[in-house]
Image (cartoon, rainbow, N blue to C red):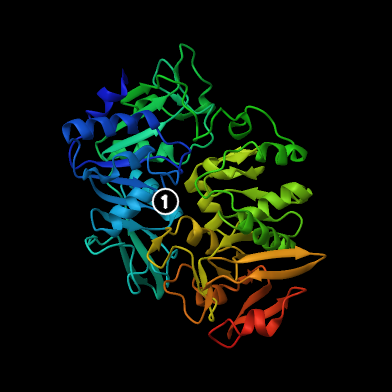
Amino acid sequence: MFTIMSADEAVKLIKDNACIGLNAFHAVGNPEALHEALEKRISENAHPWNISIVCAAGFGTWENDTFVETYADSGAIKKVLCGHYSSMPVIEKCISQNKMEAYNMPMGTIAHCIRAAASGKDWYFTKVGLNTFIDPRLEGPALNEISKEEYVKYLLIDGEEYLAYKTPKIDVALLRGTKVDPNGNISFKKEYLTIDALAMAQTAKRNGGIVIVQVDEVSNNFERPINVVIPGMLVDVVVVSNEKQLAAREKTYNPSLSGDIHVPLSHMNYWLNKITESKPIKNKKKEEYSEIIAKRAVKEIKPGDNVNIGIGIPGAVGKYAAKTGLIKDLNLTVESGGVGGLPAPGTSFGATIGADMLCSMSSQFDFYEGGGLDICFMGALEIDSHGNVNSHKIEGKLAGIGGFTNITVSTKKVVFCLSFTAKGLEVEEKQGKINIKREGKLTKIKKDVSSISFCAKNALERGQEVIYVTERCVFKLTESGLKLIEVFPGIREKEDIRDILDFEV
């Protein structure tokens, strides 16, 4: 039977050396009251200590005073395993200073590992990650010198290559829902996502652990069974937030993200403009070349396509589709579980404006890895002459792989969206012509990438179509590497493209 406690009482149940499973997608789903209580207890009592945190996505907001970031540099955290790191600047700094172990694996694979752990599996087998940095034959998932645990193994079974991922042993699941009924059943009526709440709770219980759920209200009424996400038999502790918790770092509750209101396609742009921007602050220069890239990239879509749109520059593709009405021809999806509608930007990234359906994250990745996507739009930190892509780290800056590898592994057409150069690039479009007003100091297209997130060899073997859209030209992946297939009006092919590259294309 579940017990209602304060957040301060609940976190006292977390013991030293515990592995905490956090069901969050950046700001969305993060149980803020529990983090505040944990920070307080750690600062006052130095407990719990030597804790590990497992989260399929990332769990920060690009700020250093929210959620786990408030106690990340206390010394209490021994290890972190998650898919995305750039939203957590304090944790990223601790990793670079070897203050905590850290491992980066594909978001969808971690979600599948959590689900596999719920059924008692110690390892999860998949082809996702082969010939990328995750593959132990290349680099492996460890992010610094003190990270020695073997999380990924390379295997050859009946002549087929696989990677085996170790599943997590979660002692405490920290979750968030909207309402608890008299039997402890948790519904998510006001939430923007379920992420993998059920699998996380099952995994903790299977490991003999405890499940703590932060909710907005206690109800005397029973919810319809179909609306219950976590059954009461899995719930140990319920924490009722003192204030109305928001499903993301928004100023007000957004009914378009929970599905409380229906959002017609004609109103997507209105609700898009109501979303709070996150730390990657609006940058006018970046918006200009992102718009150019988006306008060209969106031409790759065919009516009826199942689509995924990544964060960063690719996000402009979704905005452009909403603004121009192209969204009516698409089936947009978000890796966190949204189907239909429009991916939300900013602090609500991971949520969906006007979704038709919200599923678990592991189910969404089942669809992606099974080849359900017709096209995806992904960002890139750098690409190389062979067509390989690095999207997870560059020049000591760690972004994390996120769902990138799971999304691109089986999608029929992969469109990478990136600027040709960075650090100072200024571009304008006038009368259909592109003018490079100021060239960036860093070239993002080079002979060899520093680390591989997307393996071109794998894509060629699978027969995928891969193109790379910049603000000045388009490349295509061929058997002989990158091929320049389009130069935009106003761009000088020799001076603005070929002379900048350190290889022949």
- Residue at left 38%, top 24%? 232
Which percent across, then down, holds residue 327? 73, 48
Give left or right: position of 134 versus 253.
Answer: left
Which percent across, then down, holds residue 189? 54, 26
- Residue at left 65%, top 54%? 316
Pick whichever, 158 or 175, lies toward us.
Answer: 175
- Residue at left 62%, top 27%? 260
Give left or right: position of 21 versus 179.
Answer: left
Q: Quadrant of residue 440?
A: bottom right
Q: Quarter of the image containing the N terminus?
A: top left
Disc 1 marks a residue whose amino acid type is His
Pick whichever, 42 or 206, lies toward us.
Answer: 42
Which percent across, then down, holds residue 325? 78, 48
Q: Crowding at label 1, few (<14), some or many (≥20) Cα neighbours within 10 Å?
A: many
- Residue at left 58%, top 32%? 258
Q: Is residue 14 visible?
A: no
Residue at the outermost right position: 431
Pick whichever, 329 or 312, lies toward us.
Answer: 312
Residue at the outermost bottom position: 504
Which percent across, then down, holds residue 323? 75, 47
Q: Quarter of the image containing the C terminus?
A: bottom right
Q: Under tag 1, what secondary structure?
A: helix
Task: Please say if 456 is above or below 398.
Answer: below
Residue at the outermost front position: 437
Residue of label 1: 112
Give left or right: position of 326 versus 449.
Answer: right
Q: Is residue 309 visible?
A: yes
Task: Please say if 265 is above or below 79.
Answer: above
